[in-house]
Image (cartoon, rainbow, N blue to C red):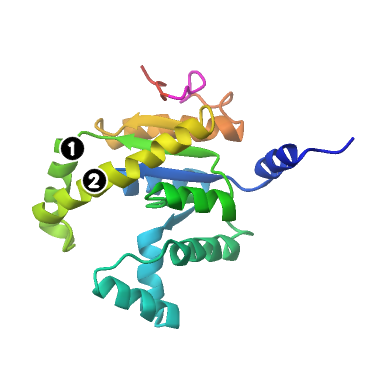
């Protein structure tokens, strides 16, 4: 008996290496949590911003094109960013245990294109953090980071962009599939935040039963450690 198209897609999803998205506002702690996931699960961390900057450093034709777009204050086309992510995934397919995508998708059209060209993530982690807390973190980071975007004017613009374009991405995935999105408060200390993320990833990898950190399976609200 043959499989339907939908069944075949589900089978490929199970067989493929997992893709995990980490979404959250600027200053919500995405980088901090990604470092821990890479350490414990051997996933390849794919930051869209880092990939673009690396391509510019290489001096390739694509890199020069991206550099000019950024100098002009324009957005790099989504297809370019997606191609860089796909290329990095292909180059590491024999070494990575999975893929951790940070900073992408930033808008619904990007999410739809990723779904079409690459596939569906196994998990979408949304780090919830109040605007005031994110603002405080970014200003503190700006004291030593040297990043030009860690200033109050730019921070407010980034918050506005996140609210307008990126929050709907979370809603998109929340409606796409039950329990695909987990929402985790990133206000507590990083280690407490990570306990919930750790157990959520362990859940779809099938290793929770033997791990003492995870008392019970995560729900879509990720209320694990209460």
- In this rendering, would 221 be left or right of 135? right
Camera-nearest label, 2 or 1: 1
Direction right: furthest residue: 1
Q: Which residues are magenta?
A: 213-220
Screen quadrant of the C terminus: top left
Q: Counting other residues with Cα less than 10 Å from the Cα at mark 2, is it few (<14), some (14-19), or many (20 or more)?
A: many
The reply to whether residue 37 is visible in this rendering is yes
Is residue 217 on the magenta stretch?
yes
Vertical order, 165 against 176 (above or below):
below
Q: Residue at x 43, y 83 (%)?
A: 61
Front residue (pair 167, 130): 167
* Res. 22 mark: none
Front residue (pair 73, 42): 73
Residue corresponding to mark 1: 131
The reply to whether residue 43 is visible in this rendering is no
Q: Main secondary structure of the magenta part?
A: loop
Is residue 136 on the magenta stretch?
no
- In this rendering, would 147 be left or right of 193? left
Residue corresponding to mark 2: 27
């Amino acid at each position: 008996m043959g499989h339907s198209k939908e069944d075949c897609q589900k089978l490929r999803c199970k067989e493929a290496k997992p893709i995990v998205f980490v979404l959250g506002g600027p200053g919500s702690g995405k980088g901090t949590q990604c470092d821990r996931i890479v350490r414990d699960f051997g996933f390849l961390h794919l930051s869209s911003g880092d990939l673009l900057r690396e391509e510019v450093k290489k001096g390739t034709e694509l890199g020069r094109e991206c550099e000019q777009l950024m100098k002009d204050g324009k957005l790099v086309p989504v297809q370019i960013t997606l191609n860089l992510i796909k290329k990095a995934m292909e180059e590491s397919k024999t070494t990575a245990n999975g893929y951790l995508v940070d900073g992408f998708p930033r808008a619904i059209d990007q999410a739809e294109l990723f779904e079409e060209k690459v596939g569906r993530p196994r998990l979408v982690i949304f780090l919830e953090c109040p605007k005031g807390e994110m603002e405080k973190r970014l200003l503190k980071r700006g004291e030593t980071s040297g990043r030009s975007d860690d200033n109050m004017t730019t921070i407010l613009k980034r918050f506005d962009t996140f609210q307008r374009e990126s929050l709907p991405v979370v809603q998109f995935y929340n409606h796409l599939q039950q329990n695909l999105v987990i929402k985790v408060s990133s206000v507590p200390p990083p280690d407490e935040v990570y306990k919930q993320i750790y157990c959520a990833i362990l859940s779809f990898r099938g290793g929770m039963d033997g791990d003492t950190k995870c008392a019970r399976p995560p729900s879509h609200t990720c209320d694990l450690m209460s």
